[in-house]
Amino acid sequence: MLEIERKFLVKSDDFKEQAFAQNKIAQGYLSSIPERTVRVRIKGDKAFITIKGLGHQGGMSRFEWENQIPLEEAVELMKLCEKGKIEKTRYEIQAGKYVFEVDEFYGENEGLVMAEIELDSEEDDFEKPDWLGEEVTDDKRYYNAYLSQNPFKNWGNK
């Protein structure tokens, strides 16, 4: 239940040609405090509830628990979520033995495109595609819970 994840900005749309899957995602937060975020996500025709703990040093590792829930329940739970829903399309791209998930955001976070990769260990090496930009793993502004409360469009100097 330990998630090891690194986050990067994306510098071109070239990833779209390499995607083997894409899904629309809507998500909201029942709790967005960093010590325990509780997220409701609708991804295509499936729904999930996820609890994440506070990130370890540098933000690369943290506790994560996720379970699939009935779509109808997720729709009802979304009504209880805090202000600030996240809307995005997620593209999945194979790069060596790992899969990058690239999120293209809409609504309040329009213009932000970010890639994530989940690793087996913090020391793992991985292929870095040409479209991969600056690493932002340790910048809390790029976490979805933060984006739900502080949208990208309001950042000013990005």
Image (spheres, grey):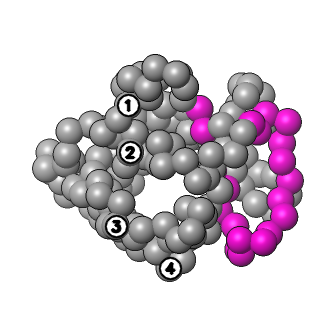
Separation of residues labelled 4 and 1 (CA atoms): 28 Å
For badge 2, the amino acid type reads Tyr
For badge 1, the amino acid type reads Pro
Residue designated by label 2: 146
Q: How many marks?
A: 4
Of the image marks 2 and 3, the number of the one nearer the N terminus: 3
Of the image marks 2 and 4, the number of the one nearer the N terminus: 4
Residue 44 placed where, x, y %? Answer: 43, 45
What crowding class fits label 1: few (fewer than 14 Cα within 10 Å), some (14-19), or many (20 or more)? many
Of the image marks 2 and 1, the number of the one nearer the N terminus: 2
Q: Is residue 19 visible?
A: no
Residue designated by label 4: 1
Of the image marks 4 and 3, the number of the one nearer the N terminus: 4
**Magenta span of residues:** 113-133
Vertical order, 90 against 68 (above or below): above
Q: Residue at x 69, y 50 (%)?
A: 100
Separation of residues labelled 1 and 3 (CA atoms): 20 Å
Vertical order, 50 against 20 (above or below): below
> Which labelled disc corresponds to residue 35?
3
What crowding class fits label 2: few (fewer than 14 Cα within 10 Å), some (14-19), or many (20 or more)? some
Left/right placement of residue 74 relative to residue 57 reads left
Q: Residue at x 48, y 49 (%)?
A: 140
Separation of residues labelled 2 and 3 (CA atoms): 12 Å
Secondary structure at numbered mark 3:
loop
Left/right placement of residue 26 relative to residue 17 reads left
Secondary structure at numbered mark 4:
loop
Tell which of 121 and 57 is nearer to you: 57
Q: Residue at x 83, y 42 (%)?
A: 129
Secondary structure at numbered mark 1:
loop
Residue designated by label 1: 151
